Amino acid sequence: MHKLSIRNISIFITILFFLLFFVFLIIGTLSEKAPKINRGVNTIMGEVGISAPEGTKFALQNLSGEIVKLEDFNGKPVVIDFWSSWCGPCIKEAKVLADGYKEWKFRGVEFVGIAIWDENKSIEAFIQNNDIQYEILIDKEGLTAVNFGVIAVPEKFFVKSDGSFAFKINGPLDMKSLDKYINRLLEEGKE
Amino acid sequence: MIYNNLPKIGLIIIFIFTINSCFATQDYSEESLYIKLEKEIMCPVCDGQTLDQSQSLIANNMKDAIKKKIEEGYSEEEIKDYFINRYGDSVLAYPKMTGFNSIAYIIPIIAIFLGVVILALYIRRDKVK
Amino acid sequence: MNTFGFYILSLGFILSIYSSLLFFFGNYRNNKIMIKSATRSYYLSIIMIFISCVTLIALFLSNDFSNIYVFNHSSLDMNRALTFVAFYAGNEGSLLYILLVHAILSGLLLYFSNKKIKSSLSYSCGILSSISVFYLFVLIFFANPFEVSQLNHSDGKGINPLLRHPGMYIHPPLLMSGLASISIPFVISQGALFDSKKDNNWFGLLRIWSFISWTLLGAGLLIGAWWAYTILGWGGYWSWDPIENVGLMPWLVLTALIHSVMVEERRGMFRLWNIILVSLTFVLALLGTFINRGGPVVSVHSFAASTLGFLFLGFMIVMTSYSLFTIFYKYKNIKDSNNKIESYLSRESSFLLNNVLLVLTSLIILWGVLFPVISIIFTGTEISVSAPYFDKTAGPILLGIIILMGIGPILSWRKTTVRATISRILPSLILTIIFLVCLLILGINKFFPLISLCSIFFVLTIIIKEWVGGTKSRMTSSMNPLTAFSKMIISNRGRNGGYIVHIAILALAFGVVGTKFYDQRIDTNINISEEIAFKNYNILFENIDQEITNGNSVTKAKFSVYDEEKKFIGKIEAMHSYYPNYNQISVRSGILSNPIEDLYIIPKDFIDETNMTVRIAVNPLAWWIWASGPILLIGTLITLWPSRQRKDKKWK
């Protein structure tokens, strides 16, 4: 009798163990896996959690060597875009941002592009080709990118006029979504 | 007599040396801190690789960031927190020993303990008296 | 040809179904004709599988890019020798390869063991052919390597650059063979469970086959580490990546098995425990296949990732439930001899402890691999479990196992006293203490390496003492020590082969300690004809060579290495190969190796024609890790070499 009960207990424990194990595996396999990022280009689209703590700032040189800071835009809502000239999605949305800025600057919205993992020459060509009028800054060492918790390009931070972060969008935008997000930024800024 | 005591003496010597070496000077230079951090922080875009294994763009920047933070006098914990604040908990290459994640360490200890105890009980039961 | 391959595969599928049904039914009815027919059809299905492999290779060789698999993994400019690698470079091909190994090994089992374990063999083969049926099912319905695309491609995509390395000819095939071969000991044990005649011959077979699997898997892992060391360009060789871990777990349990099987051989004990271990190994191997092909964890080895995860998960669940069921309901067919463990201090007990520790290590690694999934389910936060965790949890246990490795083999069977044991290890203990003092004087003062090095030294001295003693007792006046030594080795192949394998593991551990705790490195920018002093090396950057072969551009940096006194030591070549089709750079580090330390140069960036950034690293004792491979092989061969007339039923 004694022996039998030990046997039953061990059977029970083993079966329980394996059941739990399989349930884990099934749930784990079902749950969505984050899509992979391909050579620094963002493939996770849409809104993501803000990756930089409140109050994160930057101070970077532009192509002519002047230092531009986030505080310089104080009082205006800012869209910070991390990009690279070789990145496909960035190339795709370059026109959108350039044209969007031409409209939005009249309504007091500032754009800043921060180029990472890039060369001055190709940045210059990129600005010229797409007729970009907003400030483009160069993050040579990539430290600003790390400071903002960037993992790939393009990533955009929408900053309210008081300097706090509103939300963060990964992946390229089209005209419609750009307008939508900026309107949302302005809405949130009012509150 | 001496034959019997030798192993004890040996064990005591080993014990003293191990205790001694536990408190021996550990290398906390900037260089070794950098190497340690590089092995304990994950590259956020490469599946399951730590920074020292990865050559990806962001991983290289993060390595530079670590160097800079060490130069600025940040401590090991502060640098880790800096990255956790930006890249989430998964940037650390191991589960923290706090909260739910401490289970990751508790279970192995329990398992080893139980394993050895059950083994001892089994041998005792099986032993020919 | 594509349709031909597919039909052959389908034919193999039908034959396997037929043979597995007939094997089971024939075994149930004890009908010899049925079993004979099943055996023949199984041989035939093996031939079909072989033919379909040949067909796929022929498709590769004839550059038939209408085949999707060939299109994805080959190109016109590919070196023909790489066809072998391309064959298993993807999901479909690697499945076919695993199936081929499975088929060949089961053919061998069927052919050589027909007489030995007749009573249960047909049942074992039934399971073997069921496993074939599963793989063929997946291949035919979900991962057909003979799928034809509608488009007309004139050239293929080419093979992944990371795979263009000599290690790739050996590492994946060995590892996959190792994982596939585990099904052989598994079915042998299943046959034993179902054998009501309580035939004991199957145990010798189990011992041999599990040792073969162990060697295959171990060699596969070791060569994988070597590949990572030379090509992945980060200076390490083992990153505790989930895919590496799922290869390591069955290997650890197999290690436990090949020890406890020895207890069975000598004393007729632990039979059921051995069967549990085999089944656990088998389940872990299936888990490996599952995680490899679409499991829940992320890994850098995603070459074969596919959507087949659920199929493999299902197969694993079925096989696990099946083996649990058979163990619980058929264990009465397994009878131990009347021997019992007699003392805590005996060979049996030490083997049991070794078993428990190895199995627990393997389970702890499994726990670490799955912990990210558990964390997501319970807390919703994503975390990583990587090298630092496994170093902390599995590391100390592995060290404990190494210490046990010294004490275990010198304990006698049945029982021994503390006094006798201590007097046997006393010389080694004293030597180890002297060694410890030397290490401390040399300035090695970190806790973990100190303990590890002492344990390694301790075990080594014990083995040497055993050998010296054995040689002395054999040596007559007319004999020279070398012949006496070789005679001693041959006199007990199992034991001494085991010792040699232990020495290989010690060499491995020695190298791991060196590289883990004492690696040094600098990252630096260097100009041509500049000289850099690092540790006791002077490294002169000679020149950069650029050449274009097969459309891939290769940039080589050449270095000359001198020692402190400007004496020339050697040359190092480190290179980047850029593959435009893949937009991928493969880094080949330059290594100057000797038993004390490796000088390791990783080219990071070529800035321009005269300037580059490199990482220069010194990895102490790395040589010993790779040296353990040949030693392991020698030990394995000595152990497995068939000896004349093994006496069955030795135990009393």
Image: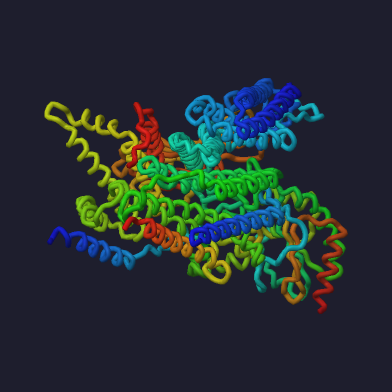
Left or right for A88, reference C349: right
Q: Quadrant of residue C489?
A: top left
Left or right for A14, reference C447: right
Q: Is the image coloured rainbow, by chain, by secondary structure, or in one colour? A: rainbow
Residue B52 visible? The answer is yes
Q: Where B80 sits versus C18, above or below?
A: below
Instruction: Please name whichever residue, C94 or B31, is drawn nearer the observer in this view of the structure.
Output: C94
Instruction: Please name whichever residue, C623 or C612, is drawn nearer the observer in this view of the structure.
Output: C623
Q: Position of residue C517 (x, y in %)?
A: 39, 54
Left or right for C499, reference C178: left
Instruction: Please name whichever residue, A104 or C327, is drawn nearer the observer in this view of the structure.
Output: C327
Q: Position of residue A35 (x, y in %)?
A: 70, 52
Q: Position of residue C281 (x, y in %)?
A: 52, 45
Residue at image coords 28%, 47% = C412
Left or right for C82, reference C501: right
**How many numbered circles does the render carry?**
0
Residue C57 visible? The answer is no
Residue at image coords 29%, 31% = C490
If the image is split into quadrants, where does the C terminus of chain C sit? top left
Residue at image coords 41%, 56% = C397
Q: Quadrant of residue C468?
A: top left
If the image is split into quadrants, where does the N terminus of chain C sit? top right
Residue at image coords 50%, 45% = C275
Q: Position of residue C564 (x, y in %)?
A: 31, 44
